[in-house]
Amino acid sequence: MSTKLFLDSGDPKETRAALELLGHIDGQTTNPSLIAKNPEAAGKKFSEAEIYAFYKGVVSEISGLLKPEASVSIEVYADAQTTAEAMLKQAREFNAWIPNAHIKLPTTAEGLKAAEVLVGEGVRVNMTLVFSQNQAAAVYAATQGAKKGDVFLSPFIGRLDDRGENGLDLIKNIMEMYKAGDGHVEVLSASVRNLQHFVKCLEYGSDIITAPLKAFKEWVDAGRPESLALPENQNLKPIAYENVALSKPYAEYDIRHELTDKGLAKFAQDWNNLIA
Ligand code: E4P
């Protein structure tokens, strides 16, 4: 199996459980909502310095549990007003926390500006909250020149399903569109909620899948299938493939998406709720 498997969790106890279950994982993704759900943070209030120290402690512990070549994603705080400069400041700081970080940036105009600068500095990035092919093309264009492994793209399946669209189609479409590229961006399928999401991403050849422990358990219980004849969810509206060229300057793509804005606001809210 060529797809790498990451755990989607802000809790090192789950890292241990995933290692026990699978024997090996290739990395882990975190985000502000997952950090807020960590049992040692949930319901508590921190000063700003304390919450960043907590986040650093969590990712350091996770990093220590994994092989040196594994990746651990750390997400910047960003709301609708956060500038590329502010993201860069956080990214450089977080990147020094552990030796194997990918810095998660939102796929917004400011996030793309920050990504372009960071890949130029050799900082690895994971572009998150991706809901459209145009966003995926813009990430490809903004990170030209980066080497394979340095840029992840995180399209969110479950959140598209939540509003009645077939999120798995987005993975299929981006994989198809990226065939025309040089392979420098790896598709990290995210917002994976169930066995069907998990196995379809394997079938589509997603470079990486990040999934919560519960989805890994379902997959292991099913005998670790790499394909399955599961019935399609007929209630989901298909997402059509669009012919999007990868060759435009990144600022020329229309990257607006309502779910990116909503996702940004939710991450910011969950993070701010932790701060006294
Ligand atoms: C991981 O990188 C994403 O932040 C995560 O998969 C989002 O999942 P959710 O849509 O279930 O919150």
Image: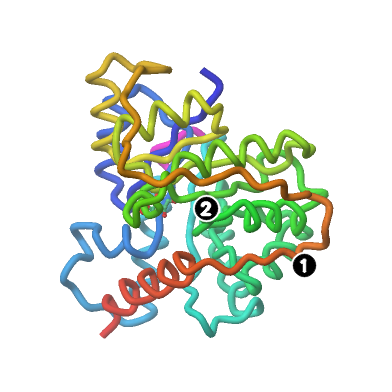
Report the quarter where the C terminus lies. Answer: bottom left
Question: Is residue 83 visible to the viewer in this orientation of the structure?
Answer: yes
In the rendered view, would you say 12 is above or below 176? below
> Which quarter of the picture shows residue 87?
bottom right
Residue that appears at 53% across and 28% down: 204
Residue that appears at 32% across and 54% down: 162
Secondary structure mainly formed by the magenta segment: helix
Is residue 172 rendered to the left or right of residue 149? left
Q: Which residue is mark 1?
A: 252
In the rendered view, would you say 110 is above or below 206? below
| Between 145 and 44, the one nearer to me in the picture | 145
Q: Residue 85: say if magenta.
A: no
| Between 189 and 49, the one nearer to me in the picture | 189
Q: Which residues are magenta?
A: 63-67
For label 2, count other residues whose C-alpha is less than 10 Å away and answer few (under 14), some (14-19) or many (20+).
Answer: some
Q: Which mark is residue 98?
A: 2
Disc 1 from disc 2: Cα separation = 34 Å
Question: Is residue 63 visible to the viewer in this orientation of the structure?
Answer: no
Q: Please, what is the three-letter code of the amino acid marked with disc 1? A: Glu
In the rendered view, would you say 67 is above or below 227? below
Residue that appears at 29% across and 50% down: 11
Local secondary structure at mark 1: helix
Local secondary structure at mark 2: loop
